[in-house]
Image (cartoon, rainbow, N blue to C red):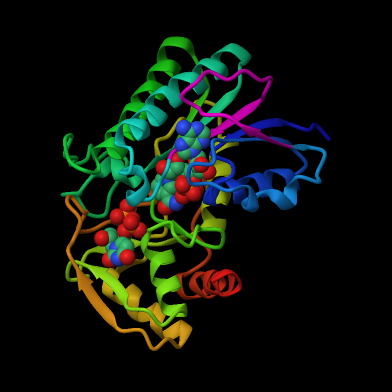
């Protein structure tokens, strides 16, 4: 068996830690790089005894060199609360991180996958969102450091491919949840579950009629690996998400029902530029990757609730 050497930036985060585990289980050698801003050692501590796993503390805004066959570039805070904490750093992470990792890929001839996002569509005027839609993003709003950072990263990826023939893959990830989200992550699924398990008020922002389409983390990891292994010449961008769309109020009610919580729903102001609707068109992922999500919301929420029961 050929053991591939794989670098995962942001590997100690929520998605990255699931990805590292899966790649190790498939017999690869995995280098997990992280600056531990939103990720934690706890997420990967159980992998440390595996001799084919290495944990590296490093910030992607500085160059990094390693011999590697593949790079999954995930380093970037993903929760609005955390990416807006230091917006300049967030943008540097996306842009300088992309330059540094693309430079590495070019130098060692590695294939490189960028974890992009449905946020490139902004507050979309087209519904559901197809990869051909250019988006509706406020370049000076509170979410711009993340949205425009990720859009710039896509531009860098495409141009390293065109100009330097770097083998790139771009995945546009829609809202993903599951075990190992940080309890203080600030994203909606973890917030609602933690609140419900503690019988605290459930904080719905706005009227709760905005929608999201929630994907379970195992489905995402499957999509990422399929994209990395997709045919030569297929670069994406490709949407990977679960098209089942729910309002935030429906999500709150579902979480209360599944936890048997006594929590009440309360309403808080809607953050600025919060997208009103979001649903992936996944026909490209079906065609090119033979991928579609397997875990529906209730099943995924039950697994996630079980995880949070152990830690809160
Ligand atoms: P996360 O915050 O749990 O993980 C991000 C990881 O990157 C953390 O471990 C963090 O410490 C690390 N990191 C941040 N800045 C860094 C830097 N400068 N150098 C090195 N490491 C750094 O978030 P996640 O949900 O696991 O998201 C992973 C990736 O997927 C992100 O790029 C995110 O934008 C993308 N994504 C996630 C979702 C989702 O719903 N989870 C949706 C769209 C896109
Ligand atoms: N949200 C909410 N209560 C919370 C956290 C989030 O109502 O405690 C809403 C938020 O305003 C947004 C949706 O849930 O409309 C998804 O938010 P999240 O931060 O998870 O992701 P994103 O907005 O980036 O999709």
**Apparent side of residue 301 relative to residue 134 in the rendered image (left or right):** right
Residue 58 falls in image quadrant: top right
Q: Is residue 294 magenta?
A: no
- The secondary structure making up most of the magenta span is loop
In front here: 195 or 285? Answer: 195
Which of the pair 194/97 is nearer the observer?
194
Q: How many marks?
A: 0
User: Is residue 79 among what the camera can see?
Assistant: yes
Q: Is residue 131 above or below residue 310?
A: above
Tell me if residue 70 is in the magenta stretch.
yes
Q: Residue at x 24, y 77 (%)?
A: 266
Task: Where is residue 231? Give x, y as percent.
Answer: 56, 32
Q: Quadrant of the N terminus?
A: top right
Residue at (31% x, 31% y) in the render: 88
Left or right of residue 305: residue 32: right
Q: Residue at x 35, y 61 (%)?
A: 213
Residue at (56%, 71%) from the top-left corner? Answer: 303
Q: Report the quarter where the C terminus lies.
A: bottom right
Above or below, 108 relative to 224: above
- Which segment is the magenta one? 54-76
Across and down, in percent, residue 270 comes to: 18, 61
Of residues 111 and 92, the one drawn nearer to the viewer in this rendering: 92
Q: Position of residue 193 (x, y in %)?
A: 44, 72
Residue 173 showing in the rendered view: no
């Amino acid at each position: 068996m050929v053991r591939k050497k794989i670098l995962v930036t942001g590997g100690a985060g929520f998605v990255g830690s699931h990805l590292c585990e899966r790649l190790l289980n498939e017999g690869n050698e995995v280098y997990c790089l992280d600056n531990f801003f939103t990720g934690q050692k706890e997420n990967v501590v159980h992998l440390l005894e595996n001799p084919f796993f290495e944990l590296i503390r490093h910030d992607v805004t500085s160059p990094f060199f390693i011999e590697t066959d593949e790079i999954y570039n995930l380093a970037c805070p993903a929760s609005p609360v955390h990416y807006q904490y230091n917006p300049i750093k967030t943008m540097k992470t996306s842009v300088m991180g992309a330059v540094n990792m693309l430079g590495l890929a070019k130098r060692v001839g590695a294939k490189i996958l960028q974890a992009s996002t449905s946020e490139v569509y902004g507050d979309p005027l087209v519904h559901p969102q197809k990869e051909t839609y250019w988006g509706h993003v406020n370049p000076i709003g509170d979410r711009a450091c993340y949205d425009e950072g990720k859009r710039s990263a896509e531009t860098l990826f495409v141009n390293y491919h065109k100009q330097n023939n770097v083998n790139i893959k771009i995945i546009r990830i829609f809202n993903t949840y599951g075990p190992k989200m940080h309890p203080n992550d600030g994203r909606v699924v973890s917030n609602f579950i933690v609140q419900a398990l503690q019988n605290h008020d459930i904080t719905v922002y706005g009227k709760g009629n905005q929608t999201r389409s929630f994907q379970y983390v195992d489905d995402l990891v499957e999509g990422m690996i399929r994209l990395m292994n997709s045919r030569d010449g297929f670069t994406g961008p490709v949407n990977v998400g679960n098209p089942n769309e729910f309002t935030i109020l429906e999500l709150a009610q579902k979480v209360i029902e599944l936890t048997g919580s006594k929590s009440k729903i309360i309403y808080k102001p809607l953050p600025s530029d919060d997208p009103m609707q979001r649903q992936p068109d996944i026909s490209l992922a079906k065609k090119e990757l033979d991928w579609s999500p397997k875990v529906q919301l209730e099943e995924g929420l039950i697994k996630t609730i079980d995880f949070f029961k152990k830690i809160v």
